[in-house]
Image: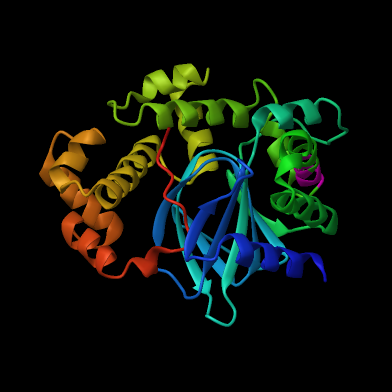
């Protein structure tokens, strides 16, 4: 049995329902779906994603990323994305895994590795797709197989997750991830601002304060922010607010006015206009359509800012 067959077997065993499952291995999520999904907005934390079977499409701003088995997707910073399962059937389900990345582990590894960072230079997208490696998939299998031996998780998980991070740094785009662990790099400073915005997305946005936090001029900050996120700071905050409001309405059954207030909007009419532009329908019509057919949104976890 090859590695992908092993992972298909484990996902089918532990994720027997449609949708997302946070496993007993804390950094690991499993996903399974038997049909394509509608486009689902999701707030990604820094993570490594692997498709084991099926196919998916992810949109960041106007950029579209498609990936299939044999490829990996990495979100190196906190990003509001829109995901869409494009290939899945009952006989050939969509199956995927995601691993939360640990900045401290990355930093420790980078300090002990010979990685050609070629200076800081310009910032790059905080999201990329590339071919995976056999060594990385081997490491992933060893992590997921701990579900079969739960008594080993406390001892073996830190060691095996460290190997996953190491193998990721050795991929073709590893240097881009390594830059996030470099104190003072442009990528690291934008990443710190994104965490700040994620933690305070309900508050009014002051771009000059964010630029000061990044130790950049306003013009330089705008440039690097858009390079990393494919959107402006205002667009980024709006995506965080609207995505979280949608999650609140779905999970807590709150009305549009309550959700709007909770995510920082003072005007319900403005919230409804911006929501409709992003999701294609006014808030309650959108939520009603989803609740009538909840299987349409399987395959992506709804992760609110924390």
- Find the magenta span and give its range: 164-170
Is residue 134 something one can see in this rendering? yes
* Closest to the observer, 165 or 209: 165
Q: For residue 221: magenta?
A: no
* Closest to the observer, 288 or 132: 288
Residue 243 x %, y %? 34, 47
**Colour treatment of the image:** rainbow
Q: Residue at x 45, y 33 (%)?
A: 222
Residue extending farthest bottom: 91
Q: Give the quadrant of the C terminus.
A: top left
Q: Residue at x 43, y 69 (%)?
A: 37
215 over 280 or under it: above or below = above
Q: In the figure, is residue 306 to the left or right of 50?
A: left
Is residue 299 something one can see in this rendering? no
Q: Give the quadrant of the N terminus.
A: bottom right
Q: Examine the residues drawn in magenta and state their main secondary structure.
A: helix
Q: Residue at x 35, y 37 (%)?
A: 237
109 over 137 or under it: above or below = above
């Amino acid at each position: 049995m090859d590695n992908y067959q092993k992972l298909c077997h484990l996902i089918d065993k532990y994720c027997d329902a449609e949708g997302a499952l946070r496993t007993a291995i804390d950094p690991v999520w499993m996903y399974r779906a038997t049909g394509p999904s509608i486009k689902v907005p999701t707030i990604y934390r820094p993570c490594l994603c692997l498709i084991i079977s099926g196919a998916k499409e992810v949109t960041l701003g106007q950029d579209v990323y498609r990936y299939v088995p044999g490829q990996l997707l990495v979100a190196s910073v906190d990003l509001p994305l829109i995901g869409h399962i494009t290939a899945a059937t009952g006989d050939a389900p969509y199956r995927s895994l995601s691993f939360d990345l640990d900045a401290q582990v990355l930093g420790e590894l980078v300090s002990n590795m010979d990685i050609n960072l070629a200076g800081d230079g310009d910032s790059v997208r905080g999201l990329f797709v590339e071919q995976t490696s056999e060594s990385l998939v081997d490491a992933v299998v060893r992590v997921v197989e701990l579900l079969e031996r739960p008594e080993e998780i406390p001892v073996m998980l830190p060691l095996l997750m460290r190997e996953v991070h190491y193998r990721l740094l050795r991929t073709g785009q590893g240097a881009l991830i390594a830059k996030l662990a470099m104190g003072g790099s442009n990528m690291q400073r934008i990443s710190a601002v994104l965490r700040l915005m994620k933690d305070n997305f309900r508050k009014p946005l002051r771009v000059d304060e964010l630029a000061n936090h990044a130790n950049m001029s306003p013009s330089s900050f705008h440039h690097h922010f858009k390079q990393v996120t494919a959107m402006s700071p205002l667009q980024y905050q709006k995506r965080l607010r609207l995505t979280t409001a949608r999650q609140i309405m779905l999970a807590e059954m709150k009305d549009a006015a309550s959700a709007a207030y909770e995510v920082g909007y003072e005007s319900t009419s403005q919230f409804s206009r911006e929501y409709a532009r992003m999701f294609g329908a006014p808030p309650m019509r959108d939520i009603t359509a989803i609740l009538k057919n909840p299987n349409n949104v399987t395959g992506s976890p709804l992760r609110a800012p924390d």
